[in-house]
Amino acid sequence: MAFIKLYRDKLQDNYRFLDQIFTARNIDWGIVSKLLCGNEIYLKEIIALGTKEIHDSRVSNLKKIKALAPDIQTVYIKPPAKRSIDEIVEFADVSFNTEIYTIKLLSEAAQKQNKVHKIIIMIEMGDLREGVMGDDLIQFYGEVLNLPNIEVRGIGTNLNCLNGVMPTQDKLIQLSLYKQLIEAKFGVTIPWVSGGTSVAIPLMLRNARPMAVNHFRVGEALFFGKDIFTGLTIEGMHDSVFKLFAEIIEITEKPDVPVGELGENVAGNVNVAMDDADLNNSSLRAILDIGLLDMQPQYLEAVDPNITIFDASSDMLVIDITNSDTKYNVGDLVTFKIKYMGALYLLNSDYIGKQVE
């Protein structure tokens, strides 16, 4: 079985790095755990870091977190579905919201459960995913302000998640102005302006964050140390908290050009005809015990720089080891660095082992 390994020391280093920079700026922050897909081995690792707040987009994952660490504040980070309202109030201390109808349901459920449920009102800032339109925000806030058992914890926005709109200084200043408008109109205090995700960390490190933005929710930067503005690793962080290991199950010298009439493969792709000059070429190919059921090849990078990924079928990944300096044998493990979406596929697969080192 192929397996993914979490390196505890690198995770701890990344957590300490982030916690120090947030603490120095008086910023509250929580870990986004949705990447872990509810895996209890890995949830225990992030709880052990000492975090006070964990965010997830699956109620079942928040339920596991509450079972493991009841005192951690849990945050449900997408607008709640009607059929999940009771569970969200039970297992999420805070939820992101964009619909009056839904918040009224949360209020009713919170009354039944004798709880105060906190909400963050998400505002549309251009990425065109979830969010209340800015022109409607004052009326929206007025309608939810006095709902029983509901506390408006803050306002927030999501950027870069759908259309790639970046969290520029101007965007976050605009979000800060919405806080001022609400506070002036209603005579209230908005504790959180949740405008920060992993993609906004470089902005903060350049001291370009508006001071009112005082809450971050971080996943990708913690696990991959990535500066999403540049694509590089943030200085002082690790990019390899996770690695994938897959076993070689065949090694054979094979032609580079498929033989026979070409049609769609299992993934629905059709190979492009190759030049006649390639007909006599061959390469040393290794087949690994992992496939499209578990991952997408474009999100993997072999640690051995001389390995090239050919393609994958449902259960097998084909790589070219011709130019590698390593003498590979059947049964050997090949190691891969993983991108965020690659880890999401792998961690969601029951066919991939999960380990900690």
Image (cartoon, rainbow, N blue to C red):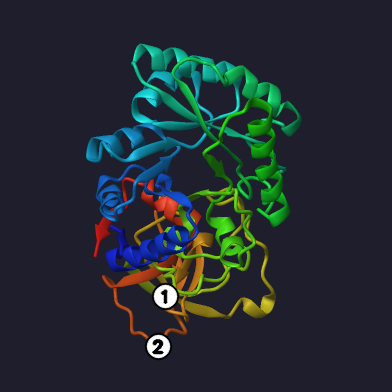
Circle 2 or circle 1, nearest the eye = 1
Where residue 352 sits: x, y (%)? 32, 53
User: In this rendering, does residue 314 appear at all?
Assistant: no
Quarter assignment of residue 274: bottom right
Observer-nearest of 348 and 159: 159
Q: Residue furthest bottom?
A: 325
The residue identified by callout 1 is 303
Q: CA distance from mark 2 to mark 1?
A: 12 Å
Q: Quadrant of residue 262?
A: bottom right
Location of residue 183 in the rendering, given as x and y in whole percent from the top left corner = 63, 33
* Residue type, mark 1 in image: Val
Residue 62 left/right relative to 234: left
Q: Residue at x 41, y 66 (%)?
A: 17
Quadrant holding the C terminus: bottom left
In the rendered structure, which disc, 2 or 1, sits on the residue that comes first in sequence?
Answer: 1
Q: Are the residues at dot 2 and dot 1 in contact (C-beta closer than 8 Å)?
A: no
Type of the residue with mark 2: Asp
